[in-house]
Image (cartoon, rainbow, N blue to C red):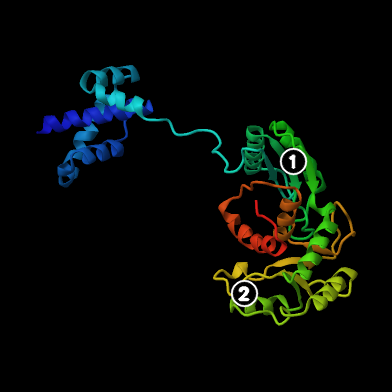
């Protein structure tokens, strides 16, 4: 019985060694043996030293000897290794991409590109090469305070795109297109999809967490347009007013409820100076730009899944189709 078990161990150990071109793995061999012979599971403690003994013998052999011995005692296991398909490599197909794509890589230039940046640049660019279309480098640079852009970082991203073989077809800086977001904001208000909130931040958070509406949510369109224009002309100070996008105030996730689209920021911007005092937050700016630029597919990390959920409300209010 022990000799029969030893022969099985040798087969599975050699198969593991040939497959991975390295000394066989004890755990993998034990797993394979127990899968083949479940009746041996109660004897695992007794069998472990036997596996270790076989593995020591095999470790003294060369890769060529592993394969020759496996062909001698279990040629069917060699065929099994060869028959296994290699995992699919390269980019996965994109649904609806056959007619060409518009892809974007959209960093905030508040620091140098990272290895993660390189991944995003390459994947988006390669999809454009695969399907044809346009690769856009877009700087989401509308936060002059918390993620304040560095002037030199704009050039760093452009240089690194070129170095990676991902030359952008178009380069856009959101901070230079704020008027476009104002136009969308005003249209959104007219459609009843946004309102100016005058709550203190802590007060609004308490309402949001309780799934209760802000008292300003039911202002008329004219009232909201007047408050919006007062945000723009300097009548309000920082923190006194924000423009919120209407969502489902009772949404199960508080992060989705009536999110802020614009806030007042009086600090100058490194690229455009004091040209604006009302700045879009990332979810508003990014959502609008994806529409204006005709982006067809968006690649995001799981950490940004809430961005899509928030932005879909904006798209629905405006009658747009989400990428």
Seen in the picture, residue 30 relative to 272 is either above or below; the reply is: above
Disc 2 secondary structure class? loop
Residue 11: give x, y in percent of width and height. Answer: 23, 28
Left/right of residue 318 with respect to residue 14 in the rendered view: right
Seen in the picture, residue 273 relative to 62 is either above or below; the reply is: below
What label sits on residue 157 in the rendered view?
1
| Residue neighbourhood size for the residue with mark 1, other residues' Cα within 10 Å, grouped as few (<14), some (14–19), many (≥20) | many
Does residue 91 show up? yes
Residue furthest bottom as drawn:
215
Residue 123: give x, y in percent of width and height. Answer: 62, 38
Provide the residue designation for mark 2. Answer: 249
Distance between the Cα atoms at labels 2 and 1?
A: 39 Å
Q: Which residue corresponds to the image point at 84% horizontal and 62% vertical from the top-left?
A: 267
Which residue is nearer to you in this view: 215 or 16? 215
Seen in the picture, residue 108 relative to 29 is either above or below; the reply is: below
Q: Which residue corresponds to the image point at 83% horizontal and 75% vertical from the top-left?
A: 227
Residue 150: give x, y in percent of width and height. Answer: 79, 49
Disc 1 secondary structure class? helix
Q: Quadrant of residue 212?
A: bottom right
Left/right of residue 199 with respect to residue 231 in the rendered view: left
Number of numbered callouts drawn: 2
């Amino acid at each position: 019985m022990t000799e029969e078990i030893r022969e099985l161990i040798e087969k599975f150990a050699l198969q593991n060694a040939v497959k991975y071109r390295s000394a066989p793995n004890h755990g993998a061999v034990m797993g394979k043996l127990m899968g083949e012979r479940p009746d041996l599971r109660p004897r695992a403690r007794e069998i472990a030293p036997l596996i270790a003994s076989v593995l020591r013998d095999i470790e003294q052999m060369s890769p060529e000897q592993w394969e020759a011995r496996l062909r001698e005692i279990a040629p069917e296991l060699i065929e099994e290794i060869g028959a296994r398909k290699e995992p699919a490599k390269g980019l996965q197909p994109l649904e609806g991409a056959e007619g060409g794509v518009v892809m974007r890589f959209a960093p905030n230039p508040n620091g140098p590109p990272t290895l993660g940046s390189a991944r995003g640049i390459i994947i988006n660019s390669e999809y454009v090469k695969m399907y044809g279309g346009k690769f856009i480098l877009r700087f989401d640079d509308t936060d002059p305070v918390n993620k304040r852009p560095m002037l030199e970082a704009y050039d760093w991203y452009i240089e690194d795109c070129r170095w990676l073989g991902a030359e952008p077809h178009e380069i856009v800086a959101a901070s230079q297109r704020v008027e476009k977001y104002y136009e969308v904001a005003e249209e959104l208000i007219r459609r009843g999809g946004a309102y100016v909130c005058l709550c203190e931040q802590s007060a609004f958070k308490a309402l949001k967490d309780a799934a209760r509406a802000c008292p300003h949510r039911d202002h008329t369109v004219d009232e909201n347009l007047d408050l919006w224009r007062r945000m723009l002309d300097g009548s309000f100070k920082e923190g006194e007013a924000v423009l919120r996008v209407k969502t489902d105030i009772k949404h199960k996730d508080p992060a989705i409820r009536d999110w802020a689209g614009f806030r007042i920021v009086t600090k100058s911007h490194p690229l455009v100076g004091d040209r604006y005092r009302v700045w879009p937050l990332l979810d508003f700016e990014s959502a609008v730009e994806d529409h204006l630029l005709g982006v067809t597919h968006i690649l995001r990390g799981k950490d940004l899944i809430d961005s899509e959920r928030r932005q879909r409300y904006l798209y629905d209010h405006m009658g747009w189709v989400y990428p």
